[in-house]
Image (tube, rainbow, N blue to C red):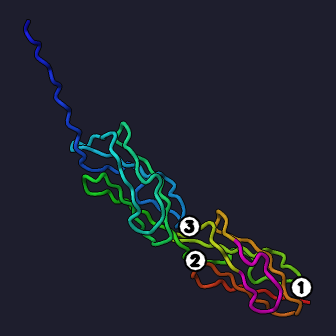
Amino acid sequence: MLAQSGCKKTPVAPVAVNGFTIVQGNNQVAQAGTLLPTPVVLRVIDINGDGIPNVTVVFAIATGGGTVTPASALSDANGEVSVKWTLGQGAPVQSLAASTGVTAPAILLADALFPTAIVSAQGNNQTGKTGQALANSIVIRVTGDNNVPLTGIPVQFQVVSGGGAISPQTALTNSFGEVTVKWTLGTLAGSNSATASAATLNPVQLSATATP
């Protein structure tokens, strides 16, 4: 009997990784310390620009602090991976690196907004009765670059002269970048003054007049 010759299959070489295409999520702007609104999506590509599945991509914060979730991901059938990037408090310009360990990493950038302005939106320069709360609440607004309202920023109030009290003394800005407080004037007629401060910004000067 003739021996049957074996037929060996030639192994298919893995497709070589040539780099990344940034699908979405680069150059976003958000408040420092918050999650970027759009997930970061990258595509692992070969020399022809086609996506490569089943490639592990490792992510790391390069500058600015913050977090990325997950820290590594396997590319899907389209060669894509998706992660969520939460900005840190370290710098206005922040960066995220993505790498397969084969080619140069992809670098994504984001702009982090920090408080740049604090203003009186309502209630300054009122006149009211001694020992009573002013008719209109005091509203203070905190914004970042391009007048973007910032959420969750602590604003502190301090009565400087005239006695009286502001309640609450500390509050966090809402989704409009605002805090609302009540100012009760002192028991003596005359000028009352207070300040509202946030972060390292110059405090807002508040004034009121108490009448008998």
Residue type marked 2: Ala
Q: What element carries label 1?
A: loop
Q: Quadrant of residue 75?
A: top left
Which residue is label 2 attached to? 117
Q: Is mark 2 on a helix, strand or loop?
A: strand
Indicate whether 84 appears above or below 202: above
The residue shown at (15%, 24%) is: 8
Marks 3 and 1, how far apart at CA:
36 Å
Q: In the image, which disc is placed on residue 123?
A: none
Indicate whether 191 appears above or below 82: below
Which residue is label 1 attached to? 131
Whether tag 1 and tag 2 are in contact, CB under 8 A, the answer is no
Indicate whether 52 appears above or below 194: above
The residue shown at (80%, 76%) is: 182
Residue furthest out toward the right: 212
Q: What element carries label 3?
A: loop
Q: Quadrant of the C terminus?
A: bottom right
N-term mark: 3 or 1: 1
Which residue is label 3 attached to? 148
Q: Quadrant of residue 166?
A: bottom right
- Of residue 152 and residue 121, the one placed in the foreground of this image is 152
Q: State left or right for residue 145 relative to residue 57.
A: right
Percent across and percent down for residue 161 are 77, 92
Tell me which segment is drawn in magenta. Answer: 157-171
Percent across and percent down for residue 33 are 53, 65
Crowd tier of the residue under label 2, counting other residues whose Cα lies within 10 Å: few below 14, some 14–19, many 20 or above: many
